[in-house]
Amino acid sequence: MMTVITDNLPVFVVIAPLFVAFILPTFARRLRLVEGLVIIANTLWIAGAAYLASIVLSQNGIPITYALGGWQAPWGIELKAGSLGALFILIIAGVSLMVSFFARNNLTEEVGSYERVARFYVLILLLGGALAGMAVTNDLFNVYVLVEIATLSCCGMVSARKHARAAEAAFTYLILATLGSILVMGGIGFIYIITGHLNMAFASQELGRVWQNSPHVVWMAFSFFLVGFGVKAAVFPLHVWLPDAHSTAPAPASAILSGLAVKGYLICLLKILYNVFGQTLMQQYAVQRILVIVGTLTIMAGSILALTQDELKRRLAFSTVAQVGYIFFGFSLINTKGLSGALFYLVSHAVIKSTLFLAAGAMISATGEGKISGLAGIGRKMPITVAAFTVASLGLIGIPLFSGFIGKWYLLLGSMEAGSVIPAVVIIAGSVLCAAYLLPVIRVAYFEPTPEVDVKDPGLSQKVALIVLAAAVVILGILPGPFMELANMAATELLVLK
């Protein structure tokens, strides 16, 4: 029995949330049952993800492969659950479980009727399944299909809030995301034209043999992938959809969008860069220099724009733009420390930004005030919520003993190993700017006069979610353990592939 489970684990962790999403609308009028099913599904999902990670760790990173329908590559779709996939699925399942806890008994005010809440949960599960598929698929066209499922799910979550701004933000997101999808599809088309393969391993092998015959086609493919995924991951200046989308969505949606969805597109880009093109072609076309420039612009522009925002969720949204730049830096370094730092920072940011958006949502819901200046003294009224926000802020800044420090430290080591000064300087400058736009929120919450209003921490489920996520930020900073080990093995595997 265990052998059967192990052999089918790569497909199980993808279809489990999709299956629950399929049956959920049947119980749309019974909200408590819907919420219970979602939490049970996420609990089983994280158990499957943890089992997958333990297997990969015990096999020293050797991936589990699965041929859908029994059709072997290159004729069929191949799933490949290695260190990278196990790491990302584990964080998807973990964050999704905590977001589901936070959303329990807490969505009808923002979303509306029970049926609308049930549809919202369907979208979360569809997005989770799509992201898990992105982590393990080894097929380029499958990447495109999963990216489209994720994009449509995100648009639905943004528009779920009962507000005119939400519909406008969702429409803007849909238009720009469609443009990104067209470019991604174009890049896949170019690869297929010159290699005749959609399987990443076979396409990479053929590309290494024939790229000199069509150098301009390869450059076009690089360009289409970088811009297409750049739009979806909200790198500067392709970020214009993100601030409105993330700030107007319901708090659980904002946490999922910023914590997980953006990371899924980055994982797809990473796999295509290293598993299809490989480090040799990246260096041949100076892609690493492009990534450094994009990372620098994204960190600095996102941080400066965040400083100018008085609305809390918009400040956090621009912060997401800035943090994407750190991951681009790691992708550009082409060494183990840099890549493992980027992957660990991706995990850390998923937990941190989910905590920040959920805490911000709780504060805004309790006070009815979205501006930072209107949250004066709220730290004494909502101690658990603001404490979680504070822990996550310190992690994002990169203070030692918090998870963000580990990722940034490895990125700095990778920069020095690569002999690249610019990333190291920008990482430090970005951390200073991060402190400049997050610490004032903490100061206002704790040290400004407390208003005479009756606000308090949210319900038990919301407090549990915030406490667990904040604890994870600290635990990952002190004992990175298996997450850092998976990140190191994933980086080594990416660099070994030609």
Image (cartoon, rainbow, N blue to C red):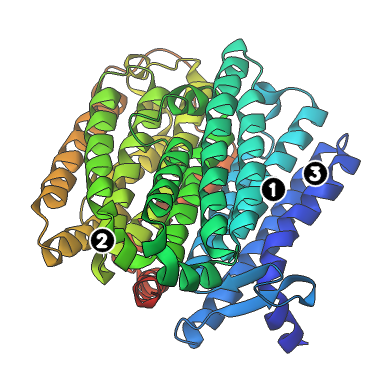
The answer to which of marks 3 and 2 sits earlier in the sequence is: 3
- Given the image, on which type of amino acid does mark 2 rest? Gln
Residue carrying label 1: 125
Secondary structure under tag 3 reads: helix
**Which residue is drawn at the image coordinates 56% and 39% (left, top)?**
181
The front one of 273 and 224 is 224
Is the residue 279 above or below the residue 58 in the image?
A: above
View extreme (front): residue? 213
Is the residue 476 above or below the residue 2 in the image?
A: above
Left or right: residue 250 versus residue 70 is left
Residue carrying label 2: 283
Residue 374 position, x and y percent, is 37, 14
- Given the image, on which type of amino acid does mark 1 rest? Leu
Left or right: residue 248 versus residue 237 is right
| Mark nearer the viewer, 1 or 3 | 1
Picture quadrant of residue 103: top right
Query: Local crowd at mark 2 within 10 Å, few (<14), some, or many (≥20)?
Result: few
Query: Local crowd at mark 3 within 10 Å, few (<14), some, or many (≥20)?
Result: many
